[in-house]
Image (spheres, helix red, strand yellow):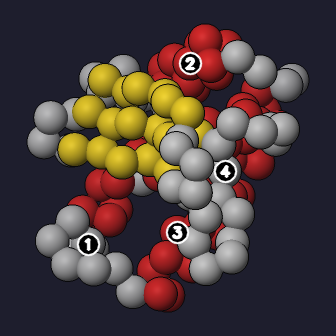
């Protein structure tokens, strides 16, 4: 899939998730940027909540780009919870990270299933 099409998906899901105040960029991730501890990661979102700007770094290979975009935007959607838990000023716990990933994965699945009718 071309980056232009992925950016279009991002804009559509940004609107669906009510994140239209945010300036969100989607770029190809640099080689090895997403791999850590032998685990393959398809994307990563970095954001500045004060400036309402975010960048999604996405792996350029064959995978479901729509799932990946929904997943990363869901992290942004749930940022207020992380902020309320204090993780914007201190490191999050492993338990929090696990719970957040499980929640985001479920949310991604629900959103995608309901968008296809």
- Pointer 1: what residue? 87
Q: Secondary structure at mark 4?
A: loop
Residue 110 percent across, percent down from the top left = 74, 46
**Image quadrant where one finds the N terminus:** top right
Residue 17 percent across, percent down from the top left = 50, 32
**Badge 1: few (under 14), some or many (20 or more) residues near its Cα, within 10 Å?**
some
Q: Alpha-carbon distance for marks 3 and 4?
A: 17 Å
**Badge 2: few (under 14), some or many (20 or more) residues near its Cα, within 10 Å?**
some
- Pointer 4: what residue? 42
Tell me the residue at 22%/34% (across/down): 52
The residue lying toward the viewer, choosing from 11 and 112, is 11
The circle drawn on residue 100 is: 3
Is 91 above or below relative to 70?
Answer: below
Residue 34 in view in this figure: yes
Q: Alpha-carbon distance for marks 3 and 2?
A: 24 Å
**Which one is earlier in the sequence, the residue at label 4 or at label 2?**
2
**Which one is earlier in the sequence, the residue at label 1 or at label 2?**
2
Residue 14 percent across, percent down from the top left = 49, 26
Tell me the residue at 30%/55% (across/down): 80
Does 108 sit left or right of 25 as displayed? Answer: right
Q: Secondary structure at mark 2?
A: helix
Please tell me whether mark 1 or mark 2 is closer to you in this view: 2
Is 98 above or below relative to 63?
Answer: below
Residue 111 in view in this figure: no
Q: Alpha-carbon distance for marks 1 and 3?
A: 12 Å
**Badge 4: few (under 14), some or many (20 or more) residues near its Cα, within 10 Å?**
many
Please tell me whether mark 1 or mark 4 is closer to you in this view: 4
User: CB atoms at circles 3 and 4 under 8 Å apart?
Assistant: no
User: CB atoms at circles 4 and 2 under 8 Å apart?
Assistant: no
Tell me the residue at 21%/44% (across/down): 49
Does 61 sit left or right of 86 as displayed? Answer: right
**Which one is earlier in the sequence, the residue at label 1 or at label 4?**
4
């Amino acid at each position: 899939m071309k980056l232009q099409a992925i950016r279009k998906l991002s804009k559509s899901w940004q609107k669906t998730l009510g994140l239209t105040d945010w300036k969100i960029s989607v770029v190809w991730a640099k080689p090895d940027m997403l791999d850590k501890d032998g685990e393959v990661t398809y994307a990563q979102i970095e954001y500045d909540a004060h400036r309402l700007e975010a960048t999604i770094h996405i792996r350029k290979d064959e995978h479901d780009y729509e799932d990946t975009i929904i997943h990363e935007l869901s992290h942004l959607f749930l940022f207020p919870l992380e902020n309320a838990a204090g993780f914007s000023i201190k490191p999050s716990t492993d338990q929090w990270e696990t719970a957040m990933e499980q929640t985001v994965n479920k949310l991604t699945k629900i959103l995608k299933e309901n968008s296809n009718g």
